[in-house]
Amino acid sequence: MRLPGCFTALSAAGILLLSCVCSSVMAAAVPGDGRDAASPSMEESSVCYQIVCMDDSLEQMMIRCLPDYQEGVRLGEELKSRVCVKSGKLGDIDIRWTIIDASENAYMKYLDTLLMEQNQRDPRDRIDLFAVTTGQLGKYCDEAAAVALPLWDTGLQDTDLSEQYDVMKIPACDSGGIQRAITPDLPVGVWAYRRSVAKEVLGSDDPETVASAVDTWEHFEETAGKMKEKGYRVYSSYTDTWRAYADSRTVPWVNGEGVICPDGNLVKWVDMTFADAENGRLAGTLRGSEEWLADYTGEQSRTFGTFLTGDGLAALAAGDTASGGDWGCVCGPASYTDSCTWYCAAAGSSNTLLTGEILQKLFCQEESLEQIISSGRRGVNHRTAMAHAQEKADAGWDFCGGQNVAEVYDRAAALCVTGNGTRYDSGLNAAFMEAFLPYFTGQTDEEGAAAAFYDNAMQRYPDLLM
């Protein structure tokens, strides 16, 4: 991807130069939170605190959860919003925001440049907190990379992190099991379905009825047959079920000797998808395309459901007023976690305890996480906050027919398989899907698709073995 010239010409030093015009930011200490009274607090500090991230979601969380936060000066408009430099004020602390709104690769290149220069810069200009994507966790949380501190170095304690879901902790740990990143999100995949289709084919749109119809892959395929008999498709895209299968693998994509090891679940996905395509149980669209979206929206939809995260459901709700109230969600045969934003404390920062306070207030306190749930019907990485959301009488979502979706997200998190991730996952997943799409459409046979996958994989990762 070629970025606008004004962005590509901007050096890391240029980003920091722009970020030097700022206001101040500060948060009140939480009484009785168990912190060491002798440690520097947000009430006492007078520092310059640097955050590098991809969007304004963290700032919006500060606005909601830190009552004294004040937005400050916005700079960088001449950069056509590719880079936004902002400041905020909360007492004596200057928060300097560098928001790089670009593709993941472009963001990571600029972040890498800044981190490489970290120890050569004045302490006030060093990065204190930075954001990464799920696909980049392995790179930045690697102990050898020495760019993300262990969370306990920021003053966070086991009690602060005990409410997180395992599926959102394990990927953020280094090879020694030390956690180096944290997220407020719980982006678990659930089976989202059209209630009207469930009523006609299954006799009920009740979540318990639907859940029993898709709780195993065998039941899922039986339901697919019932849908076909009634003139419906069970799902639309060849890849609608991909993540549920791929993230349930029992072995890593790459073993300790660097050999690519396709899991048996991937073979099952190929077989099921090919059979569904051959028997007309799916529409053959590309996931995320206009045709795919049209299959699920509007009053005339003839497609039963798909796997979505809470963010996916919220996006659907925002763009599909015609089918509002006709949706529901349940746990499917398997679950997965989608990409989200993670936050790391930067090595070389002189404000690590302040980082711990910020992370504790925003990501470890139940009140902050509950605000995320209520504002967007999203799952959050806090067990107690999710449990309380399930108990609230007014927590039903009109888009999902009044259903309390927090309960489904919570149960789906328990279905996620953890511990088999590698730094090759994103590229190998993409290579596998790309190779087998022509097989589903009859353009090649299974052997040809497999050969194409290995060719693609070796081009992406020449250090691996077949």
Image (tube, helix red, strand yellow):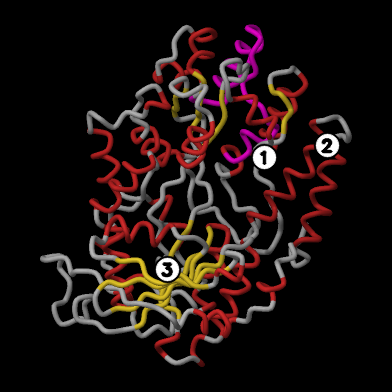
- Comparing labels 1 and 2, the label whose residue is closer to the camera: 2
Q: Is residue 5 inside the magenta stretch? A: no
Q: Callout 2 environment at 10 Å: few (<14), some (14 to 19), or many (20+)? A: some
- Three-letter amino acid code at disc 3? Arg
What residue sits right under mark 2 in the picture? 438
Q: Callout 3 environment at 10 Å: few (<14), some (14 to 19), or many (20+)? A: many
- Residue 311 image offset from top left, x and y in percent: 48, 42
What residue sits right under mark 3 in the picture? 180
- Residue occupying the far left of the picture: 32
* Near-viewer residue (185 or 315): 315
* Near-viewer residue (76 or 83): 76
- Comparing labels 3 and 1, the label whose residue is closer to the camera: 3
Q: What residue is rendered at 73% in x and 43% in y?
A: 433
- Which badge, 3 or 1, comes first in the chain's sequence? 3
Of the 4 image quadrants, the one containing the N terminus is bottom right
* Mark 3 and mark 1: Cα distance apart in space: 30 Å
The stretch of residues the image draws in magenta is: 215-243
What residue sits right under mark 1 in the picture? 266
Q: Is residue 216 inside the magenta stretch? A: yes
Q: What residue is rendered at 43% in x and 57% in y?
A: 57
* Mark 2 and mark 3: Cα distance apart in space: 40 Å
Q: Quadrant of residue 266?
A: top right
- Three-letter amino acid code at disc 1? Leu
Q: What residue is rendered at 49% in x and 66% in y?
A: 53
